[in-house]
Amino acid sequence: MSKKFETLAIRTQTETTQFSEHSVPLYLTSGFVFDDAEEMRASFAEEKQRDLYSRYSNPNVNEFVDKICAMEGAESGYAFASGMAAVFSTFATLLDAGDHVVSCSSVFGATHGLFTKYFPKWNIECSYFNIDEVETIENLIKPNTKFIYAETPTNPGVDVLDLDFLSAICKKHNILLVIDNCFATPYLQNPIKHGADLVIHSATKLIDGQGRVLGGVTVGKKELIREIYLFSRLTGPSMSPFNAWVLSKSLETLAVRTEKHCENALKIAEYLENHPKVKWVKYPFLKSHPKYDVAKKQMRLGGTIVAFEVEGGVAGGRAFFDNIKMCSLSANLGDTRTIVTHPASTTHAKVEPEVKAAVGITDGSVRISAGLEHIDDIIADLKQALG
């Protein structure tokens, strides 16, 4: 089979039924039947590979996972009910009481909550490094450090981390590298090719692309996914067959959608960079981005998210959001519709003020998820909102 991304996205399909359908059907079933007692025994003993129960696996979920594995160059994977289910289940599988994690401080608010509110209850410690102080990472590693965790590009600051640099540290210290690739998608970036052991996605975002369903997925080394599967089989955060069917269909158009999203995002970033009421703009493929060279090295395009700060602090930010007419005010991203978000009061509202300040989330910070509307209409809305 062709190794081209678009072909894999479309032609990786579950086995055709006796009806010879062209489009894969929905397998809305909780369980599966067996021919006899011996087949049932052999199946549950894993001597025979087949679907047993939809909490474990399902033909629609299998197809979605197979597509992500093919796109990411991963050996295996497991799909979850949401992106945070993927994050938590991956962490919970890998970590034991007394373990330690090194993470970039610029992470999604809910992930930060796991590190600071819940993991300490189980005697799991996290040490943060700042995005512009990667030289401190090795000093944070302890004998009980299990893995380095990072998002790149980061949420919501759209900062970029060098995957090869992180991988080299992990190999030197014999620890794992776990990367959240949500902002980039498998089309724009493949962390496994740069040494990552596991890659996590919130499929809710650009993988779906239309704001319809929740989903998450973790892919990577077979032996690690096996443990994640066993944990998830017991705890039950599995993806629904319907959501898997929707997401698998969405993957068929991921490449063409993402190309247009990125084209619009770059034009938005260029417009904002020259606006007198904008203090700063971050977009990985803007030459002004501090990690522009790294982004060009490891990403196909700059992604769909633009971060910037409006002049005037709280009042300036509030006026901008209140003046928006076409773009959506929402905490989601990766939608066909352009979305503007105020991270300080939404996605990162419960993050401590000092942590927000350290990762550059100010009261005037704005995150734009570039949609697929005509670029002239997007910019016209931003222009009038900025006054």
Image: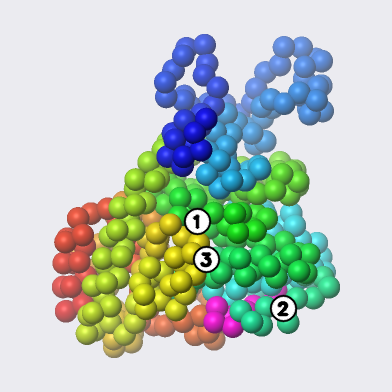
Q: Position of residue 327 (x, y in %)?
A: 25, 62
For label 2, the crowd category at 10 Å Cα-Cα, with few meaning under 14, some 14 to 19 and many 20 or more, is: some
Numbered circles on residues, count? 3
Q: Which residues are magenta?
A: 126-133
Relative height, residue 68 to residue 286 (above, below)? above
Q: Is residue 323 left or right of residue 306?
A: left
User: Looking at the rendering, in which quadrant would you find the C terminus?
Assistant: bottom left
For this rendering, which residue is in front, 245 or 143? 143
- Distance between the Cα atoms at labels 3 and 2? 19 Å
Q: Are marks 3 and 2 in contact (CB under 8 Å)?
A: no
* Dot 1: element: loop
| Residue 299 location (% of width, % of height) | 46, 60
In which quadrant of the rendered view does residue 136 lie? bottom right
Q: Is residue 318 above or below residue 15?
A: below
At 30% from the left and 53% from the top, the residue drawn is 260
Q: Residues within 10 Å of mark 3 (few under 14, many from 20)?
A: many
Which residue bears the numbered disc 3?
A: 152
Mark 2 sits on what residue?
138
In the rendered image, residue 129 lying in the magenta stretch gets the answer yes
Tag of residue 189: 1
| Residue 18 shown in magenta | no
First in sequence, mark 3 or 1: give its number. Answer: 3
Q: Nearer the viewer, residue 272 or 1?
A: 1
Q: Tell whether 293 sits left or right of 199.
A: left
Whether pointer 3 and pointer 1 mark residues with C-beta atoms closer than 8 Å, the reply is yes
Residue drawn at x 66%, y 65% is: 167
- Could you say which quadrant of the image residue 104 lies in? bottom right
Is 18 drawn above or below residue 347 in the view shown? above
Q: How is the image coloured?
A: rainbow
